[in-house]
Image: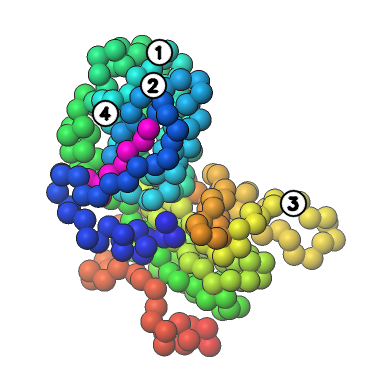
Amino acid sequence: MNGVGEMASRSAGLDAGVGAVGSKTLNVPSPLVLEAHFRGRILVVRPGGQLTPGTYERLRDGLVECAAEEPAAMVVDLASMRAATASLLTVFPTVCDRISDWPGVPLALAAAPPPLRTLLDSSAVPRFVPTYHSLSEALDDLEAAPRPRRHQMQLPCDPGSPRLARRLVEQSCHQWGIPGMVTDAVVIASELTENMVYHARSEGWLRLELRNDRLTVAVADADPIPPQLRVPGVRAVGGRGLVLVDKLSRTWGTASRPPQGKVVWAVLTVASRTRTRPTPSCGRPITEPSAAAAQYSLAN
């Protein structure tokens, strides 16, 4: 999916209740098949068949693909899956680690049948991935979890876009009560947006997301080529954007953006000492500006 707008459009007609609200089958070769469907905001993925060394990578990649749909959370329903050894279950912490920073989707396991539950309990998996006895228990817990705060803005391919990005970062950080994050987040958003304008030469979007102690800054563009981190020479002019991003962020990376393009994201750690009381927004979230407002911002 290409951002929250498209995700919302695909989910708009779905029932927000507990019943299945739409489904698809991913083409994962036998003997392991993945079925995925939404239950409210949460994507439930059910692997069916035997997890073996030969299907380990298919399950891993299939779950990562599901997370790219950017659901609020993802539950793996293990009722129809079998596994011979506990070592194969490391696929779940691996997926959890891969999707935790981007796209930032919480992962949980549920409804393992007795033989598989015994393997889970004998492994370290529950230390890294929340595990529930039933699917309903997992859904209830994830639905009750606080929702991340998110602002997103469309950005034109224009020299004024970095200024728009900086303004959104400043407003968001103050509104969310993390003014101490402004300086670093502004630098990262500005550098990533400049890459969008001057290297990708395309329009795109900026997304800010605050989840617990993590602030994610992400910029999407239409160029599929990932950026390369290179340390410029002492006399080089420019070329230090990603060096700054790497230095200021806890971690950063690139994800593909179908049908063509990429998302470059960076995660910053929000220390408790940087938090203040959030600024009231009067019920009006920060969204992308109107065309007239954008033209004014670019001109001033």
Q: Neighbour class for label 3 at 10 Å: few (<14), some, many (≥20)?
A: few
Residue 34 in magenta stretch? yes
In this picture, residue 112 sits left or right of residue 271: left
Residue 84 is tagged as: 1
Which residue in the protein does label 4 denote?
A: 110
Q: Is residue 101 above or below residue 85?
A: below
x and y percentages locating residue 143 in the rendered image: 21, 44
Whichever of labels 4 and 1 marks the residue nearer the N terminus, that label is: 1
x and y percentages locating residue 150 in the rendered image: 36, 59
Q: CA distance from mark 2 to mark 3?
A: 43 Å
Amino acid type for the residue under numbered disc 1: Ala
Q: CA distance from mark 4 to mark 3?
A: 43 Å
Q: Are marks 1 and 2 in contact (CB under 8 Å)?
A: yes
Which residue in the protein does label 2 denote?
A: 50
As helix, strand or loop, the secondary structure at mark 1 comes to loop
Q: Give the label, 4 or 1, closer to the camera.
A: 1
Q: Are marks 2 and 3 in contact (CB under 8 Å)?
A: no
Which residue in the protein does label 3 denote?
A: 230
Q: Give the label, 2 or 4, closer to the camera.
A: 2
Q: Give the label, 3 or 1, closer to the camera.
A: 1
Q: Is residue 60 above or below residue 161?
A: above
| Magenta-tinted stretch | 33-43
Q: Is residue 105 above or below residue 162?
A: above
Whichever of labels 3 and 1 marks the residue nearer the N terminus, that label is: 1
Q: Neighbour class for label 2 at 10 Å: few (<14), some, many (≥20)?
A: some
